[in-house]
Amino acid sequence: MRVSIVSHLFPTQHYPFLGKFIKDQLILLNDVNEITADLIVPTPYSLPFTQKKSNNKSPLLAEDNLSNRLFYLSMPKKKFPKIISRSLANSIQQYFRNKVYDIIHIHWLYPDALCIPKLHEMGNRCVLTIHGSDWYKNAENSYLLPLFKQVFLKADYVFFVGDQLQDDITARFPILNDKSSVIYNSVDGEKYSIPTSIEKDQSLKELGWDIRKKHFLCVASSQKEKGVDLLVQAVGKISDEFSDFQLHVVGSNNPKILKTENSSGKIHFHPTVSPDELIKYYHASDAYILPSRKEGFGLAMIEAATTGLPLVANPTGIATAFIDENIGILGDEISSDSIARSISKLIQNLDNYSRRSIRGKALALFGKEIYRDRLLKQYQILID
């Protein structure tokens, strides 16, 4: 079986954390003897001597014989999407014209999926995975919605990474009811493990965290959907209640948030780190928080659970299907008050959670073998 994966996000030397799960899928497929998978990375043209140009030249973290960049014309702020769609489709058409694949698997509704009508016209079988932000950021864009409708009409099959995401999109586009399903992102149980006491102490020492404190972790960007502002407000509400509580946020650099960050001295912002470096943060932590307003899945939360961390989460993404009383605290609404109550409750019951049970449920639902088997089953159905 020959598979081509198309994704504009993929880890590079400059940004090793971008699209990490796409790299995981590429590796997973190529570990199967009967499958050859390669990678196409759509990349917008950029002006010489700019930071974007430097980013676009950064080498992909994939074997050279498995990866290729395709360049297309893009516009800032998603202006003129028909021009973007046409440029991307032309670039894709030139690449695939003389190549034969059993499946072309496109990730992200925008911009990557805009090439699906052209690929369909060329006679290819196209699978699309929608991850969440690619829908929620564009769901009210009147220029993009007609293009999305054409994508959904021509796609052979669509995967959603979460149940709520599927419900939200199929409510708008019922045509997907008969050719879509949920497929959760996967986590590597060998890479993400419960730390020994020695490993935990070593991680705390390397990060310079106080061994006497309880450290809660959040991995999130500054985007509003990620809810870091709600989390900062929540910590302010409980800062006087727990003297040994510390919050660490990795990857958020919003100046407005940073200004309020240390009113209590309990919040510490860290720059984005590589996936391998992030494991050290999981090992040093005592719990994980997902404060998102909207979340398609929540991969960092599942990685944290695979290392045995109990969870606090807003009712969004995979948290609503995953978190129960044995896993952590699921908030009852999207608000800073709800997050504050959940953190407070978790701190008071932190010693009652079994790290092995948390890890066991994470692997039972999101293990990489489960993801691989579901993916290959759907590929084979389409081929047959």
Image: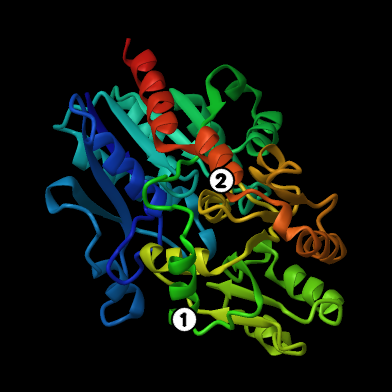
Return the disc, 1 or 2, that comes first in the chain's sequence.
Answer: 1
Residue nearer the viewer, 84 or 374:
374
Up-down relation of residue 74 to residue 82 (above or below): below
Question: Marks 1/2: CA distance?
Answer: 24 Å
Residue that protrudes farthest toward the top in the picture: 384
Left or right, residue 321 beside residue 331: left
**Residue that label 1 marks:** 205
Q: Quadrant of the N terminus?
A: top left
**Residue that label 2 marks:** 356
Place of residue 185 in the rendered image (x, y in percent of width and height, measured from the top left): 48, 41
Place of residue 314 in the rendered image (x, y in percent of width and height, measured from the top left): 75, 53
Callout 2 amino acid: Arg
For image coordinates 32% across by 9% down, the residue present is 384
Mark 1 secondary-structure assignment: helix
Mark 2 secondary-structure assignment: helix
Could one spot residue 313 in this view of the protein?
no
Up-down relation of residue 94 to residue 219 (above or below): above
For image coordinates 78% across by 75% down, the residue present is 235
Occupied quadrant, residue 106: top left
Residue nearer the viewer, 293 or 43:
293
Marking on residue 214: none
Q: Residues within 10 Å of mark 2 (few under 14, many from 20)?
A: some
Residue nearer the viewer, 213 or 13:
213
Could you tell me how many numbered marks the image carries? 2
